Amino acid sequence: MLTNAPKGTKDVMPNQVYKWHFVEKAFAEICQKYGFKEVRTPIFEHTELFTRGVGDTTDIVEKQMYTFEDYAKRSITLKPEGTSPVVRAFVEHKQFAEVQPTKMYYDIPCFRYEKPQSGRLREFHQFGIEVFGTSSMMADAEVICLAYDFLNTLGIQDLELRINSIGCPKCRERHREALREFLKPKYDQLCDTCKGRYDKNPLRILDCKSELCQELGKGAPTMLEYLCDECKEAFEELQKDLTAMDVEFIVDPGIVRGLDYYTKTAFEFVSNKIGAQGTVCGGGRYDHLIEQLGGPSTPGVGFGLGIERLLLTMEANGIAIPEPDPVDVFIAVMGEPARMYGLSLIRKLRLEGIKAEMDLLSRNFKGQFKYADRIHAKYTVVIGDNELNEGKVAIKTMATSEQRVVSIESIIEELKK
Ligand code: ATP
Ligand code: MG
């Protein structure tokens, strides 16, 4: 047990971490291009933030949160999602008093007690963005377009963008009635959780992970049939804006999303190459969340994008992430004066931005060459007593075994070439 990571968690080992660096950099770059600034919030929050924000009939709040009492008996929860904490910070720091909109992005771990399987972990990671302070569908289009461009930049071909509108509290009431009517004859077959949702929030039943509930929900009346004029217009506007930006999408009335706070726009990017957990990115609009969490009435829109699922999708699409360059230079030394000279040289090389390594295990000369090979050094600089006495060193190009002798003074210039 001691040498196994907890179920549903994964280490990212040094030989894999370059993939994470690659997507993290690409995401930060595109967010900045779109005018978003990074926000960093704590790993844990007061539990109430999520029960109120995410909604108490959601899977997350009902059965997935990592909640514990701290020593002062406060209820604390490891963040299961990114939006509520960012809203809390926005309100706490009175960002609503600044010029709007507020555009933020983040890169966070999330914690949910789920049944671990491919693409579903208990600790996973998300990229996310949020736009606060505007009801304009241009913001929704911008948020969707950012995800679209990000995924395209990475070269992912098989993703489908599906959009829907889940309306506002006004139109949702009529839809709820219709849903209850539809589900009434099937009530006894619903899972226990969904029986509880029937009265409180029947829309949640359509997002239940149980196969039977999914089956029972098929053919249910869709939200699109019940949109009020304002929501209908907004949804048409969004489609117009996406079309103007050349973003391809399909309207999928089946998209519900797993969090209660969404209003109007809901969307997903789905891959069909990574199995059942195919939703790589999901998001939408939440016009009442900020107010619900104690802030002034402020609309918002954003998405969460699972990094593990993103990497799975890239792999399934045969996209190879470039491995960073190996070591530029290995410095092989023999004898104490050579070692001293090597130390002074390695420091200078590193300050010049050259990736340099020396042996840290007191290997003999032959062992040092073997090691230089193993770590894929491009060049090896050879320094022995003779070389030092003559004021020269040898530079060996490892790929060709070709060797040149250069003066000690010119060595940095030579290597920089
Ligand atoms: P799903 O329907 O797959 O459970 P969700 O609706 O719960 O997803 P969100 O809460 O919207 O997902 O999270 C946004 C993204 O985070 C998802 O699209 C997915 O890529 C990723 N994600 C969510 N839960 C997990 C998990 N347990 N493990 C890995 N990635 C996850
Ligand atoms: Mg989920």
Image (cartoon, grey):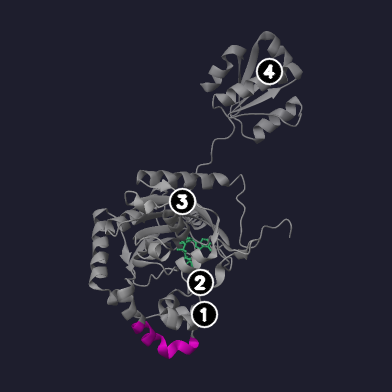
**Mark linked to residue 59:** 2
Report the amino acid beneath label 1: Thr
**Residue 259 at x, y = what percent?**
44, 68
User: Residue drawn 70% across and 58% down?
Assistant: 4
Are circles 2 and 1 on residues that touch, CB within 8 Å?
Answer: yes
**Residue 225 at x, y = what percent?**
28, 77
Q: Nearer the viewer, mark 4 or mark 2?
A: 2
Q: Quick check: 157 above or below 226?
A: above
Q: Which residues are magenta?
A: 177-189
The residue lying toward the viewer, choosing from 53 and 397, is 53
Inspect the magenta stretch and tell me whether residue 179 lies in it. yes
Give the residue pinned by disc 1.
Answer: 193
Report the amino acid beneath label 3: Tyr
Give the residue pinned by disc 3.
Answer: 106
What's the CA distance linking mark 1 and mark 4?
Answer: 71 Å
Establish whether ligand 1 lies closer than 8 Å to the Cβ of label 3.
Answer: no
Q: Nearer the viewer, mark 1 or mark 4?
A: 1
Secondary structure mostly seen in the magenta stretch: helix
Q: Nearer the viewer, mark 4 or mark 3?
A: 3
* Element type at mark 2: helix
Report the amino acid beneath label 4: Tyr
- Check the image and name the residue furthest to the top: 390
Q: Is residue 52 left or right of residue 10?
A: left
User: Residue drawn 42% across and 68% down?
Assistant: 257
Q: Quick check: 313 above or below 204?
A: above
* Element type at mark 4: helix
The picture quadrant where one finds residue 53 is: bottom left
What's the CA distance linking mark 4 and mark 2?
Answer: 63 Å
Inspect the magenta stretch and tell me whether residue 219 lies in it. no
